[in-house]
Amino acid sequence: MSHASQPPAEYGELLVALQDRIRTAQVRAALHVNRELVLLYWHIGREIVASQKARGWGARVIDHLARDLCESFPDVRGFSARNLKYMRALAHAWPDEAIVQQVVAQLPWGHHLRLLDRVKDPVDRAWYLREAIHQGWSQNVLVLQIESSLHARQGRSVTNFDQTLPTETSDLARELLKSPYTFDFLTLGSLAREQELERALLEHLRSFLLELGRGFALVGSQYPLAVGSREFRLDLLFYHLHLRSFLVVELKMGEFEPEFAGKMSFYLAAVDDQLRHPADGPTIGLILCRDHERTVVEYALREQRRPIGVSEHCVTRDLPSHLRASLPTPGDLAVIADDFVANHAVGQEQSSTGPYAKSVL
């Protein structure tokens, strides 16, 4: 049997190297195409804005442009009247071409549609734009972060980082924490205990890590620490890849109490001694409470020598929007009630064992 068709030795290494190169080129090409597409759309939007302003044209000119551009480029999608209005909105939102070239064009067009639809404040929109680029958010994640008002929660933890961390890391550490943390992917009652919250978070680890933010790696839950003859357990232990620091998270279902800070400081000292590598930064503590009074937290952290942040957490019990939209309105319920009364009356006149009675039972 001939072996002429068999690849030579070490062929697999060549194949893998070429596959990697092709995939890298594909990603670069896709990014380049996206950049050029966003720049094209921005320029089209800018021309529409300028023409309407200079000539006093109304919105109907967009309908004419959509029809004529679609006829001129029948094989190219994206020139609908709706999309042209988004192009005009993009040009309104980002009038500075330098910003568009350097920043705006890095984000895919679909992301811009979500930003234009959901974020009206220019400062907030710029914040989400940069975070989406930096964090690599998908469209769905971007929408999730907007709906949870991440911009208003980021960096809102009460901390003592200014006094306990080096200047070059205190700002970064502060920005990594937020308050409140929104665990709307959980369904816990108001009387749930810390163990139940911890178990639920671990069962939804992907969503939990997404809420924490980029760079968090879970080391363990109920992580054991031997101190003297006793063993203590940390609720959650993370390592942050950018800070190069361990992060101890303690979960509390009630209001913040001053003694929580002392216990957290004890945990941080133990982690620094037992786990921290000489090249690592100081271990950071995060106490997650259902509620806290800011002044109480500030007093509790004032004399602590180790970096601790305190944030609130909340579990959203409202129905998701896609389910809320499918529920009947009060008017619908009134109609249903009227129909029920009418049908029930008819059913009683006919027979208590008739078809309607069977359907109800």
Image: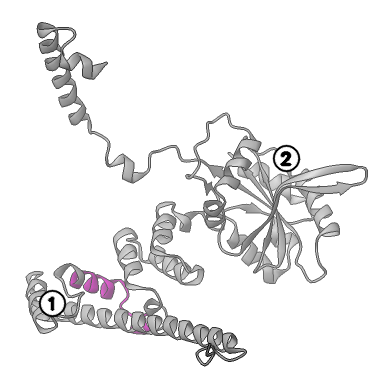
Q: How many marks?
A: 2
* SS under mark 1: helix
Counting from the top left corner in percent of width and height, residue 345 is at 12, 11
- Residue 169: which quarter of the image? bottom right
Q: CA distance from mark 1 to mark 2?
A: 61 Å
Label at residue 52: 1
* SS under mark 2: loop
Counting from the top left corner in percent of width and height, residue 192 is at 59, 32
Above or below, 327 against 115 in this view is above
User: In this view of the protein, which residue sits in the foreground, 57 or 43?
Assistant: 43
Label at residue 258: 2
| Magenta highlight on residue 87 | yes
Q: Residues within 10 Å of mark 1 (few under 14, many from 20)?
A: some
Magenta stretch bounds = 84-101
User: In this view of the protein, which residue sits in the foreground, 361 or 236?
Assistant: 361
In the picture, measured across the screen, residue 33 lies left or right of residue 11, that is: left
Q: Residue at x 45, y 86 (%)?
A: 25
Q: Residue at x 35, y 67 (%)?
A: 111
Counting from the top left corner in percent of width and height, residue 334 is at 18, 24
